[in-house]
Structures are given as structure tokens and as C-alpha cells.
Image (cartoon, rainbow, N blue to C red):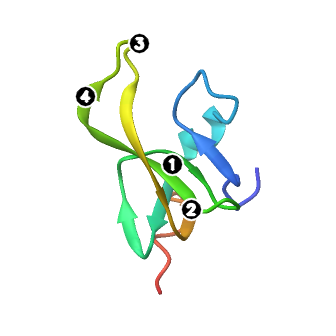
Amino acid sequence: MSDTPPDRLSVNPNSPFHDAAALERGVGVVFKGVEKTNVDEYCVSEGWVRLSVGKTVDRKGNAMTVKLQGEVVPYFQDIATAPED
């Protein structure tokens, strides 16, 4: 596996962008210069993240999320710490 995280990644196993091997390594996300720990999905090329909103769930049991636009910098936690600005 390469040392570059995927362009798009989701923690939802039903998503076509779910990658269990990458998630097992541990992927950290820096969004607009701030480390985020509640990221459900991200896309580097389109510049957005989906963040969990508390512990609320929809009627299908999926976490409620909000989509935010901005600079996304993913990294693997097993090889480095959060990138510095």
C-alpha cells in the first residue's frame, strides 16, 4: 500500500468509497488547518468533508452529517503526525 491516502474515503461500509485497509492503518484529516476527529467522509480533489453532528441518527440509523467546503489534507497516522502549516 502506498504512503498516500486515497483521494476520497468514507467510514460507511455501504459506501463505494469505503476502504477497510486504509481505515485500519488510521487516516487523519486536517481541514482548513485544524485536525478533525469526527470526519465521516472526505474528498481531496473536490475539497469537502462530511462531519458527524453529535450522536443524532437518521431513520435508517446513519449518523447525521454536515458537508463543509475547504482545504482537505489527509495523512496516515501510522507513518507521520499531522502536517504542519
Measured as percent of width and height from the top left, residue 11 is found at 52, 35
> Mark 4: few, some, or many residues within 10 Å (few <14, many ≥20)?
few
Which numbered circle lies on residue 26?
1
Q: CA distance from mark 4 to mark 1?
A: 24 Å
> Quick check: 7 left or right of 26?
right
Q: Label 2 near label 3: C-beta < 8 Å?
A: no
Q: CA distance from mark 2 to mark 1?
A: 10 Å
Q: Label 4 near label 2: C-beta < 8 Å?
A: no
Residue at horizontal 44 percent and vertical 73 percent from the top: 32
Q: Is residue 12 depicted above or below 39 in this figure?
A: above
Which numbered circle lies on residue 74?
2
Of callouts 4 and 1, which one flags the residue occurring earlier in the amino acid sequence? 1
Which numbered circle lies on residue 60?
3
Measured as percent of width and height from the top left, residue 24 is found at 55, 39
Residue at horizontal 37 percent and vertical 16 percent from the top: 61
Which numbered circle lies on residue 56?
4
> Which residue type does callout 3 highlight?
Lys
